Amino acid sequence: MHYDPIKDVFAAFTRRRPFWRVPLYKALNVLFLRSWYVRRELRAVRREFGDREIAIYDAGCGYAQYTHFMTKKLKPCRIHAVDVKREWIDDARAFFAERGIDSVEFAVEDLRSVEHENRFDLVLCVDVMEHIVEDVDVLRNFSRALKPGGVVVINSPSIFGGSDVHDDHDESFIGEHARDGYSIEDLAEKSARVGLEKARGKYGYGFWGDKAWRLSVKTPMRLLNVSMWFLALLPLYYLVVFPFSLLFNAFDYWGAPKRGSGVTFVARKPS
């Protein structure tokens, strides 16, 4: 099963119909449990920095879903949002300009080779590290890019079944990844190698989150991989499953699972 081609379809859809972009952001924030965990950490980081303006590096911004969230909820801030896909960056730049959001600059960057120095208070990296073989190099770049006292927030599949790693590869997303996933200990050890100190780590997508994922994400993706004609049936499908997915996500979010197929990790550069 392939995830990126489906994401490209939605990117093309919002490119032709930009007024659907914010509704797409809102749908992703509700359906994807990782967004619940990431947004919670971002709010916590905002509180830690107080009222001062913070400089943010959105490392692998994709649709710019979190970029948009941070412009609203982490103010005052300045954001440097990057991705390797130029068409996605061009789409986001045009959309943010049309909306009059001037606190964000967009660029095409490869996280393995960026050379920012002591520039950012916060680095956000969601659903990216598992795709990159040279992950320690990327963490080293994040450490160099952070100001002393700066924070990096990473979200990724975990080693405990992330991206359905224990399923048949034909039915999982693992074929698009450089590794199965991470444990909190693995991220802490690799962060320590580059001078970052673990602040906290949490697993998500435990028993209930996994059920929500299979209902609201995996099954639709499987159908769309068979034929994009299933796109027309998605509204009816979500009308039925959405209440259950929302409830299962809430159980996972408030239940603090000890293990899960997703991990959110926060590290800090020493002052």
Image: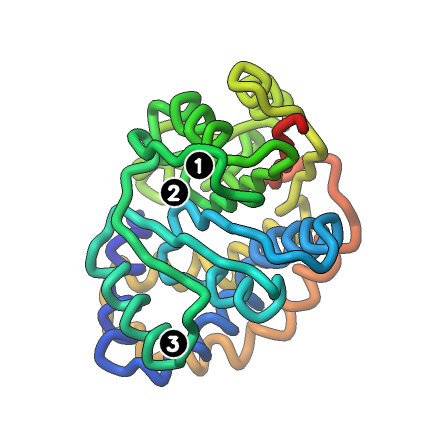
Q: Nearer the viewer, mark 3 or mark 1?
A: 3
Locate the C terminus by quadrant.
Answer: top right
The spot of residue 232 in percent (x, y) is: 31, 80
The furthest residue to the top: 193
Q: Earlier in the sequence, mark 3 or mark 1?
A: 3
Q: Earlier in the sequence, mark 2 or mark 3?
A: 3
Q: Quadrant of residue 191?
A: top right
Q: Nearer the viewer, mark 1 or mark 2?
A: 2
The furthest residue to the right: 255
Tags 1 and 2 in contact by the CB under 8 Å rule? yes
Q: Give the distance between the C-alpha atoms of the residues marked 1 and 2, in whole angstroms.
A: 6 Å
Amino acid marked by disc 1: Asp
Secondary structure state at the residue bearing disc 3: helix
- Please give the residue where the numbered disc 2 appears in the rendered image: 172
Q: Nearer the viewer, mark 2 or mark 3?
A: 3
The spot of residue 214 in percent (x, y) is: 51, 55
- At 46% across and 76% down in the image, what residue appears? 237
Q: Earlier in the sequence, mark 1 or mark 2?
A: 1
Label 1: few (<14), some (14–19) or many (≥20) C-alpha neighbours in 10 Å: few
Q: Is residue 128 visible?
A: yes
- Please give the residue where the numbered disc 1 appears in the rendered image: 167
- Please give the residue where the numbered disc 3 appears in the rendered image: 21
Secondary structure state at the residue bearing disc 2: loop
Disc on res. 195: none
In-front residue for pair 251/74 = 74
- At 56% across and 45% down in the image, what residue appears? 122
Q: Is residue 166 visible?
A: no
Q: Give the distance between the C-alpha atoms of the residues marked 2 and 3, in whole angstroms.
A: 27 Å
